[in-house]
Amino acid sequence: SCFVGKGGAMFRIAICDDEEIFRKNIYEIIMKYMDENGCPCEVDEFASGKDFISLGINMAKYDIVFLDINMDEIDGLETAQEIRKVSNDIFIVFVTAFINYAVQGYGVNAIRYILKNNENLTDLIFECIDAISKVIKHTVKKKEFKFNEGIKNVPLELLLYVESKLHKLEFYIMEDKLNKYSLYGKLDEVEKELEDKAFLRIHQSYLVNMKHIVGINRYEALLNNGIRLKISKDRYKSVKEKFVSYKGEM
């Protein structure tokens, strides 16, 4: 059965490997899977970990990354650590020529290790995507919002922050790029609705997804796409405490 990625109907996969022949091989297998299952899908290829990491927050748009462990300069494990700074929900599949890596997951929570030279590579990748699709059906937290631009089912992981302007709320959502949607309402109400979902009120005007905060210093929150948002002085101490404890739980 077809399954739905974070980007709505389109399923997004990245293949990160410095050997072109191998990238093409995986690409063909994924396309065959999607074709047989009737799933629309977008697959992008990256020739190095460095290239993939340079996407920054845009890495979050992918549902699955097939990641070669042995790459020059920045290897697959380091790449995976960078991916995890941006998203806990991307499925990381390590692909390697050497099985001895499988024991050291390095806390990046990979869903599979696949051996490159296994003659059953096609079956292994098919089985892997099947397993991921089952998990995805149960885990992506979404919430429906009635925006002025239309009703939208938003994966909460991709909601960076909500800003209150006059009587309007502006939602900044990571899609192909950072898009803005608006609705009329009160930030207090949205804060209540998102209470348990790692959203933090840092200011009268801002509700921020802690997942996308990389640092907090002197009355500012820095997000992982470079945006800085003001923290009000009276909230600063509690914001800092909540952020530290959130990071500790991750």
Image: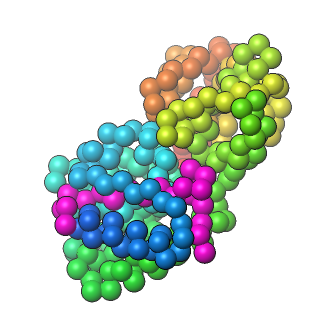
Q: Which residues are magenta?
A: 1-21
Q: Is residue 77 visible?
A: no
Q: Residue at x 49, y 40 (%)?
A: 176
Give the left or right position of residue 53, taking residue 34 as reference: left
Residue sitting at 45 percent across and 31 percent down? 225
Left or right of 153: which side holds 160?
A: left
- The answer to if 39 sits in the magenta stretch is no
Using the image, determine if residue 137 lies above or below residue 148: below
Q: x%, y% of residue 71?
A: 20, 57
Tell me the quarter of the image containing the N terminus. bottom right
Q: Nearer the viewer, residue 119 or 192?
A: 119
Give the mark count: 0
Nearest the camera: 121 or 235? 121
User: Does residue 49 sit above or below 193 in this rendering?
Assistant: below
Whole-percent x and y of residue 131?
A: 53, 75
Q: Position of residue 162 (x, y in %)?
A: 67, 28
The secondary structure making up most of the magenta span is loop
Counting from the top left corner in percent of width and height, residue 55 is at: 37, 40
Closest to the observer, 70 or 246: 70
The image quadrant of residue 16 is bottom left
Residue found at x 67% / y 45%: 154
Q: Residue furthest left?
A: 72
Residue at 75%, 41% (x, y): give it.
151
Please say if 228 is above or below 41.
above
